[in-house]
Image (cartoon, rainbow, N blue to C red):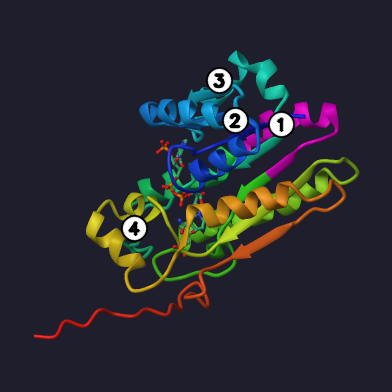
Amino acid sequence: MSRLALVTGATSGIGEATAIKLAQRGCELIITGRRQSRLEELKKKLQNLSQQKCTALVFDVSDRKEVQSVFAKHEELFSRVDYLINNAGLAKGVDPMPEADIEDWEIMIDTNIKGLLYMTRLILPGMIKRNSGDIVNLGSLAGRWVYPGGGVYCATKFAVRALTEGLRMDLLGTKIRVMTIEPGRVETEFSLVRMGDEAAAKKVYEGMNPLVAEDIAESIVWCLERPSHVNIQEMVIVPTDQASVTLFHKQLKQTVT
Ligand code: NDP
Ligand code: 8X3
């Protein structure tokens, strides 16, 4: 039987790779993001892969009214969601807290915490009614350890871990599984979005072998495909070149003159 998966933040990185893997398994998909042209491109690709319908919805997960209005327009579709992949998220800035831009804090908190909550709250009634469904929240290694300049981003990912745990408790006794995937460094558009500078973003991954989006997508799909009595509550995945949130093995290029 074909499943219906909703992947937020499918316009790049982990979300896009996860949508592709789910389509390869024959899932019907709902993909979301703010960049319409990317969503439309991906929609065509996913329909070809899955031979199933794909619905592309452009909205900002951090805008509560917008989220509610999209849900109101697609109530029947959303009531059938089997897999909710709460992936949309971002970091903004690396400045120490005394100098950081408050606007950046608000964007991270509104997207990573409130956006995830809005999506979950609206999808849950359908899952509860059918007594089935899986929710995968994208946490981070930054939801377990903090690093300088990352306090607020880390706080949002600590929140994702708490929300995942809390929801699991509130749903105990149902067949709905709630899990969090906590990656270390994955080379996506994440650092470009965070720093707004190609060269600085590239430097984050320089000299090491980071994870790629497909590594995480594969793990998400593996978790979803466990038998229904098995819930992988938390999965921490890091590159072999990363030992902690701040400790990396990097081979720096040497120039011989
Ligand atoms: P990308 O920047 O490549 O992708 C982020 C996705 O989130 C995009 O599709 C973007 O779409 C979407 N998004 C961001 N803000 C919003 C918003 N307000 N409304 C709707 N969609 C939004 O990064 P990743 O793939 O790396 O990140 C995916 C998730 O994984 C995030 O939650 C991130 O925190 C987490 N993560 C990433 C790690 C990494 O090292 N890359 C490590 C650990 C966790 P659009 O811009 O079109 O709206
Ligand atoms: C992203 C991982 O360590 O770059 O969640 O903050 S990190």
Disc 4 marks a residue whose amino acid type is Ala
C-alpha distance separating marks 4 and 3 = 33 Å
On screen, 108 above or below 2? below
* Circle nearer the N terminus (1, 3): 1
Disc 3 marks a residue whose amino acid type is Val
Q: Quadrant of the C terminus?
A: bottom left
* Circle nearer the N terminus (4, 3): 3
Stretch of the chain drawn in magenta? 117-135
C-alpha distance separating marks 3 and 2 = 24 Å
Q: Determine whether, in the image, residue 81 is placed left or right of residue 142.
A: right
Q: Residue 127 or 38: which is nearer the viewer?
A: 38
Q: Is residue 245 visible?
A: yes
Q: Nearer the viewer, mark 3 or mark 2?
A: 2
Q: Nearer the viewer, mark 4 or mark 2?
A: 2
> Taken as a whole, is the magenta stretch helix, strand or loop?
helix
Rate crowding at label 2 as few (under 14), some (14 to 19) or many (20 or more) other CA atoms within 10 Å.
many
Q: Quadrant of the N terminus?
A: top right
Pointers 1 and 4 in contact (C-beta within 8 Å): no
C-alpha distance separating marks 2 and 1 = 11 Å
